[in-house]
Image (cartoon, coloured by chain):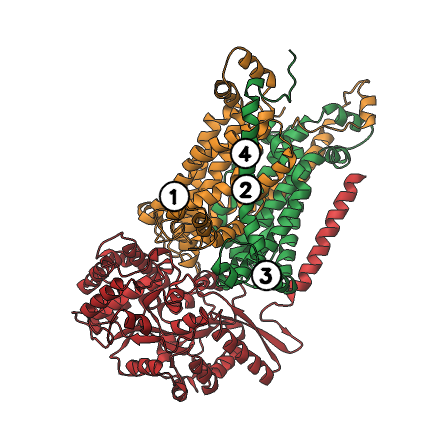
Chain colours: A green, B orange, C red
């Protein structure tokens, strides 16, 4: 009996396991989605409806909450600020990180492992731990209240993950390719730019996605850096909206639902990279 | 990473035959050139990293030796007083306890749950890709948004209470965020909701690396499903488990967003974490010296943990993203 | 090559987003003088009506009269101020005009060097505001201007008291305890408290201290940041005993004070609790949380007397005001002068946002008998002690609130609060 990799578990358990599987799947999906559905649907109700019956469908469907938020400038401002910061910190982290990973993977030099360890140490020293001195540093550099003051630290703290994922990937590219490029007259940097980076595209996309999500979802750093609401990022904006309009539950739900949209849309497009990247690092 | 395919340019295959050794250019020139290249490649990231990760760390050590409100010069040297004060402060001790609670609860609850669910979902189910997508969704949302969502759901007489009452479980209704004895469990449940999908996906991937032949062979030899799982599958999931645990523990130690938005460490300090304590004391109370000491303590926690982990847990993995050996 | 295209595309994306953000973000920059128009940022804590509209209207009217000034109004939830102000004073761009309760809180903020000394700019008119202005002085120099005085006392539901068969209002602690029992017998939650925010808990401790301690001891101890006198320990025991009588709503440690209908203010507003020990501003907060007209339903009585050294007519209170930061002092002071006008003060009193105005003239706008009784009580009070967490420096005040919150959570002893203050000093 030849075994194939994707055969379902042993036959004698087949009959019991299948419905159990589907039940588990249904349960997981239910628990995962129910809160999100509550938020989305809640935005279509009024506060009176919600107070009367917290868990119910909108009746009647009220669109004003969503419309008011979509037509106000604050939601879009938060969105744009988040986008600006996330794109900048991602470009910076991945750009600088890929260069460093290239050096650390395909050059031999003294102190190479020391430098690599330095970046690895950074992995266990997340932004949340360093926030107080980072804040003071930003203050000294007069970067408070500026988007640069958020993008730079985020990029710096994204470097460890970026380099740790990229280095083995770049190292695995056969040296024959590099040698061939040299024979063809390319410099090592040229090789990096023209051949290695394109070849590393899957990994680059993965680290970009990871850096982007981490930046987009950041709350603590923007909380400390921004006082002027027009500079807020989306997570900070949502939390501030919640505390400012605490009694307007319906509006809060609508605002929260809308702020989930960019992340979800992004995720649908990038799902393969995120999940693929994670599974890749696991199976490696 | 071996899961991704590497596209090979045509010229490379053609060149694979002929001699590939490079005739070295005059040594000095190539070594200077190499140094320049290395500088160009490494300096920017190293500078950025050192500036925003290491320098602050060193600065924090310095600030922590002073009693400093954050304004004006550092004049009030207090030595290690901030450290002793923090470590003997019952609120901070409780905060450490809360972080450790999350660490261990995650290991005891989330780990088996993720593996079990991954095992259940591992076989062929229709709509598996869609399932993967859905299950992973909470992970993509920011912690801040998650906190606002659940803050709304957990209000007294809110959605959760309404649902419980609706299905006749009204007796189970608690003051989810208002009762000091319940609040940490509530927060843990929210954290689990957010991160369980991540675990499932990770272990699903890990399971793909478990050869089906082994399981087949075991069952032929008469092993039950459970025995197979316990003796073969789980040990083979070892690397995955270790990576998951590493990420989970580091995340648990720096928990902030969810706590800050949902409870602000309350009621009466029963949900403080080291990070929320740090922000509260350091920023809200104008105690930057003290806050720096707390930050260093938090860093030492993470560092010691990682050191131990690296030594004992990760050493066994000869390959892997975190410890990849490079020639 | 594909690769170059991707890079170019990302750079283009960043530039585009940057441009957009620059356009949207820069227009609101505080404190710029563009084309002769100076923009000031104004942070206040009135996030709900009626006070939200009053401030907005005041700003609009001021802008009409002063076309070269534009004011960017930022309502911020009261509980967020304690996070945002330290951060703002630490940055390069603090708000030009911001809400401030004076006392030790202000003194701590002055250390930042960003709060402006407005003694000279206000000397011509600060006297109009009365003795209240003293609370916004630090070492003799004026650093802020008040717009309201506040007292702390018991707001109570007259209808619920009637339901429980309570006649009149309690004047001694024993009477209050009796009334609590009557309310419990009638299945009514006696007292709502917003334990989550900690300062409502501290009101109890502070007032017990005011009752137990003589005026001199109280004032000296607070000035010296030293609560070692035994009256402060007695106050702690009073709090413990009071909590032991179980007068509060379920889950009181997690209830916010003013946010949402589940807050302690909301509970009284909806008739789910009979009393709340709160400041005089709370009536307008409660009104904002319900559609029912609370005027005929709310009464007020001062904290009952206790067997102690304190004067029974002394009370806990404080005030609300605004401070200026250095960048636009002159414009800020001019605006504050405008806010202290009888006009604005009258509006504040009429809407019941302010019970005790700082300008004499506005008192004639008081129509509600309950408010009038509070005003009279204030005039006759022996003295008003500022809530401790504002009177003390910020770090110590926070530690005090935390210690009291611990008492409410069942942790600590009668001397916990003095100990915490000593440790935080």
In which chain is the residue bearing label 1? B
Q: Name the residue under label 2.
A: A30
Q: Name the residue under label 1.
A: B98
Q: How far apart are marks 2 and 3 (CA)?
A: 25 Å
The numbered dot on residue C252 is none
The numbered dot on residue A60 is 3
Q: How far apart are marks 3 and 1 (CA)?
A: 44 Å
Location of residue C129 (image quadrant): bottom left
In which chain is the residue bearing label 4? A
Q: How far apart are marks 2 and 1 (CA)?
A: 29 Å
Q: How far apart are marks 3 and 4 (CA)?
A: 33 Å
Residue B152 at what x, y percent from top left?
49, 54
Q: What element carries label 2?
A: helix
* In the rendered image, residues at marks 3 and 1 fall on the same chain: no
Quadrant containing the N terminus of chain B in the rendered view: top right
Q: How far apart are marks 2 and 4 (CA)?
A: 10 Å
Q: Is mark 1 on a helix, strand or loop?
A: helix
Direction from residue C168 to residue C367 in the image, left or right: right
């Amino acid at each position: 009996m030849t075994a194939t990799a994707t055969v379902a578990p042993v036959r004698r358990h087949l009959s019991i396991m299948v419905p159990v599987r589907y039940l588990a799947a249904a349960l997981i999906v239910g628990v995962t989605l129910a809160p999100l559905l509550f938020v989305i649907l809640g935005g279509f109700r009024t506060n009176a409806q919600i107070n009367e019956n917290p868990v119910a469908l909108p009746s009647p469907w009220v669109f004003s909450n969503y419309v008011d938020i979509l037509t106000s400038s604050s939601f879009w401002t938060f969105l744009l600020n988040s986008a600006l910061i996330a794109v900048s910190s991602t470009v910076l982290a991945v750009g600088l990180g890929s260069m460093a990973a290239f050096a650390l993977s395909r050059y031999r030099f003294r102190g190479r492992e020391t430098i690599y360890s330095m970046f690895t140490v950074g992995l266990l020293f997340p932004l949340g731990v360093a926030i107080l001195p980072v804040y003071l540093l930003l203050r000294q550099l007069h970067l408070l209240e500026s988007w640069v003051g958020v993008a730079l630290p985020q990029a710096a703290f994204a470097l460890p993950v970026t380099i740790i994922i990229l280095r083995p990937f770049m190292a695995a590219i056969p040296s024959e390719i590099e040698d061939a490029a040299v024979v063809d007259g390319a410099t090592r940097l040229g090789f990096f730019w023209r051949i290695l980076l394109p070849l590393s595209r899957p990994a680059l996309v993965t680290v970009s996605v990871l850096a982007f999500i981490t930046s987009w979802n950041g709350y603590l750093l923007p909380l400390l850096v921004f006082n002027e609401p027009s500079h807020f990022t989306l997570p900070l904006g949502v939390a501030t909206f919640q505390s400012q309009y605490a009694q307007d539950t319906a509006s809060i739900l609508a605002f929260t639902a809308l702020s989930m949209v960019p992340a979800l849309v992004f995720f649908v497009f990038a799902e393969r990279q995120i999940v693929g990247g994670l599974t890749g690092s696991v199976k490696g | 990473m071996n899961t991704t395919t590497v596209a090979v340019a045509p010229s490379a295959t053609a060149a694979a035959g002929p001699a590939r050794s490079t005739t070295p250019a005059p040594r000095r020139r190539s070594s200077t050139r190499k140094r320049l290249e290395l500088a160009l490649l490494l300096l920017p990231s190293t500078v950025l990293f050192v500036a925003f990760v290491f320098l602050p760390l060193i600065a924090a050590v310095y600030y922590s030796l002073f009693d400093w409100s954050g304004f004006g010069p550092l004049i009030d040297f207090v030595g290690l007083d901030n450290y002793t004060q923090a470590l003997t402060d019952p609120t901070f001790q409780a905060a450490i306890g809360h972080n450790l609670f999350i660490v261990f609860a995650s290991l005891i609850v989330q780990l088996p749950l993720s593996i079990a669910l991954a095992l259940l979902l591992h076989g062929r189910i229709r709509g598996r890709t869609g399932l993967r997508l859905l299950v992973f969704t909470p992970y993509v949302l920011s912690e801040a948004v998650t906190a606002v969502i659940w803050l709304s759901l957990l209000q007294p007489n809110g959605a959760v209470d309404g649902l419980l009452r609706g299905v006749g479980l009204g007796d189970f209704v608690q003051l989810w965020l208002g009762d000091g004895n319940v609040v940490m469990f509530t927060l843990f449940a929210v954290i689990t909701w957010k991160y369980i999908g991540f675990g499932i996906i990770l272990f699903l991937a890990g399971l793909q690396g478990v050869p089906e032949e082994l399981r087949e062979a075991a069952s032929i030899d008469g092993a039950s499903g459970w025995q197979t799982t316990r003796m073969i599958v789980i040990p083979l999931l070892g690397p995955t488990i270790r990576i998951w645990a590493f990420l989970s523990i580091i995340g648990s130690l720096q928990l902030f967003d969810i706590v800050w938005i949902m409870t602000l460490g309350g009621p009466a300090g029963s949900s403080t974490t080291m990070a929320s304590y740090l922000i509260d004391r350091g920023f809200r109370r104008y105690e930057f010296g003290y806050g720096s000491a707390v930050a260093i303590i938090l860093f030492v926690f993470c560092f010691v943990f990682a050191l131990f982990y690296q030594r004992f847990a990760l050493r066994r993995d000869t390959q892997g993203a975190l410890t990849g050996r490079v020639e | 090559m594909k690769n170059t295209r991707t890079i170019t595309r990302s750079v283009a994306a960043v530039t585009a987003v940057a441009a957009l953000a620059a356009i949207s973000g820069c227009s609101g920059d505080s404190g710029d003088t563009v084309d002769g128009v100076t923009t000031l940022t104004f942070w206040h804590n009135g996030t709900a009506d009626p006070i939200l509209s009053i401030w907005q209207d005041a700003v609009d009217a001021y802008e009409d009269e002063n076309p070269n000034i534009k004011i960017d109004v930022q309502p911020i939830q009261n509980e967020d101020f304690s996070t945002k102000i330290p951060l703002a004073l630490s940055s390069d761009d603090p708000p030009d005009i911001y809400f401030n309760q004076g006392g030790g809180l202000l003194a701590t903020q002055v250390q930042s060097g960003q709060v402006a000394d407005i003694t000279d700019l206000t000397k011509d008119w600060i006297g109009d505001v009365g003795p209240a202005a003293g609370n916004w002085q630090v070492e003799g120099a004026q650093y802020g201007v008040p717009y309201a005085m506040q007292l702390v006392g018991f707001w109570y539901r007259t209808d619920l008291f009637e339901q429980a068969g309570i006649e009149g209002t309690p004047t001694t602690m024993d009477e209050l305890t009796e009334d609590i029992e009557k309310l419990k017998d009638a299945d009514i939650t006696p007292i709502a408290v917003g334990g989550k925010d900690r300062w409502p808990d501290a009101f109890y401790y502070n007032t017990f201290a005011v009752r137990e301690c003589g005026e001199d001891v109280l004032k000296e101890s607070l000035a010296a940041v030293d609560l070692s006198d035994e009256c402060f320990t007695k106050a702690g025991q009073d709090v413990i005993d009071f909590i032991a009588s179980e007068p509060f709503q379920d889950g009181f440690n997690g209830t916010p004070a003013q946010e949402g209908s589940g807050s302690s203010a909301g509970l009284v507003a909806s008739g789910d609790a009979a009393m709340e020990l709160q400041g005089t501003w709370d009536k307008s907060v409660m009104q904002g949380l319900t559609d029912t007209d609370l005027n005929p339903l709310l009464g007020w009585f001062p904290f009952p007397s206790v067997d102690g050294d304190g004067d029974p007519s002394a009370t806990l209170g404080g005030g609300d005001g605004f401070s200026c930061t250095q960048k636009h002092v002159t414009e800020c002071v001019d605006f504050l002068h405008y806010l202290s006008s009888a006009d604005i003060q009258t509006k504040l009193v009429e809407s019941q946002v302010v019970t005790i105005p700082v300008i004499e003239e506005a008192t004639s706008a008081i129509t509600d008998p309950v408010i009038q009784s509070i005003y009279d009580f204030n005039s006759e009070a022996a003295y008003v002690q500022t809530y401790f967490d504002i009177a003390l420096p910020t770090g110590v005040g926070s530690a005090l609130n935390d210690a009291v919150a611990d008492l409410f959570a069942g942790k600590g002893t009668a001397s916990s609060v003095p100990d915490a203050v000593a440790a935080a000093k």
